[in-house]
């Protein structure tokens, strides 16, 4: 139990850190919301190469033309990840036909356990349109760094090499059609709020 409390504290600290970074780079929400910073932006996102749960190699260019909902997590996550992926699934459902313009990506921070096969089974339990991405430790570190995402392994008290947790950033990133950073959704994310804001961005780019 002590490990779980420590884990959540670390997650909260990481969330504050990412929020501070993102505040430099927020795009105004259509019809109101965040105001763009007048300070020099901090870049969020960038080039990457990962393996999709389908077994295909993908890069940031693989999703050009689509908005992206990106969440960093892992399949052994006891609470935050399943809650968040359920919210993403409900968001896609709430978007209706607009969901075709959005690609949801679940990027594992635990590639040692989260193989493409494991990710395929896990994401399918939430929504068929959520794509799991995994990579080597180096690729995982690189993509997390580009998104200013935090993760760290937390060992359990029994020294079981397979029974560990991963602290990680709990934000959902909304990226635009060209991979540009648009906004963050905080945990616990409200599906209807996400769908409304995503639809507003979609309407703005198609009007």
Image (cartoon, rainbow, N blue to C red):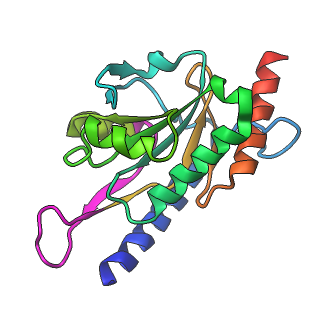
Q: Give the prevailing secondary structure in the magenta stretch.
A: loop
Any magenta on residue 51? no
Image quadrant where residue 133 sits: top left
Depth check: 47 or 118 in front? 118
Say which residue appears at 78% left-offset and 42% top-offset: 196
Residue 65's x, y, as percent?
60, 15
Residue 49's x, y, as percent?
33, 24
Say which residue appears at 60% left-offset and 21% top-offset: 66
Say which residue appears at 61% left-offset and 56% top-offset: 186
Image quadrant where residue 160 sits: bottom left
Depth check: 180 or 190 in front? 190
Residue 71's x, y, as percent?
48, 44
Q: Is 206 placed above or below 186 here? A: above
Say which residue appears at 45% left-offset and 47% top-offset: 125
Taking the image as shown, residue 164 lies to the left or right of residue 33, namely left
- For this orientation, the residue located farthest to the right is 31
- For this orientation, the residue located farthest to the bottom is 2
Taking the image as shown, residue 38 lies to the left or right of residue 178, namely right
Q: Is residue 22 visible?
A: no
Quadrant (top left, top right, bottom left, bottom right) of the N terminus? bottom left
Count numbered badges in the picture: 0
Q: Is 187 placed above or below 205 here? A: below
Image quadrant where residue 54 sits: top left
- Tell me which segment is drawn in magenta: 145-165
Quadrant (top left, top right, bottom left, bottom right) of the C terminus? top right
Residue 56's x, y, as percent?
31, 20
Q: Is 156 placed above or below 153 here? A: below
Any magenta on residue 161? yes
Taking the image as shown, residue 83 lies to the left or right of residue 132, namely right
């Amino acid at each position: 139990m002590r490990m779980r409390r420590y884990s959540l504290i670390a997650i909260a600290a990481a969330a504050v850190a990412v929020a501070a970074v993102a505040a430099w780079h927020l795009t105004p929400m259509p019809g109101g919301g965040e105001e763009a910073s007048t300070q020099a932006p901090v870049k969020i996102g960038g080039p990457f190469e990962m393996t999709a749960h389908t077994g295909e190699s993908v890069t940031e260019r693989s999703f050009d033309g689509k908005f992206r909902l990106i969440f960093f997590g892992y399949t052994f996550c006891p609470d935050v990840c399943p809650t968040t992926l359920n919210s993403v699934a409900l968001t896609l459902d709430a978007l209706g036909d607009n969901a075709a313009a959005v690609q949801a990506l679940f990027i594992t921070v635990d590639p040692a356990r989260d193989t493409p096969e494991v990710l395929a089974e896990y994401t399918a339990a939430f929504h068929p349109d959520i794509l799991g991405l995994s990579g080597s430790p180096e690729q995982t570190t690189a993509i997390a760094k580009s998104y200013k995402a935090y993760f760290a392994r937390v060992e359990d008290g029994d020294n079981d090499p397979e029974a560990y947790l991963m602290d990680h950033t709990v934000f959902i990133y909304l990226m635009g059609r060209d991979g540009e950073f648009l906004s963050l959704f905080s945990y616990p994310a409200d599906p209807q709020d996400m769908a409304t804001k995503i639809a507003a961005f979609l309407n703005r780019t198609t009007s």
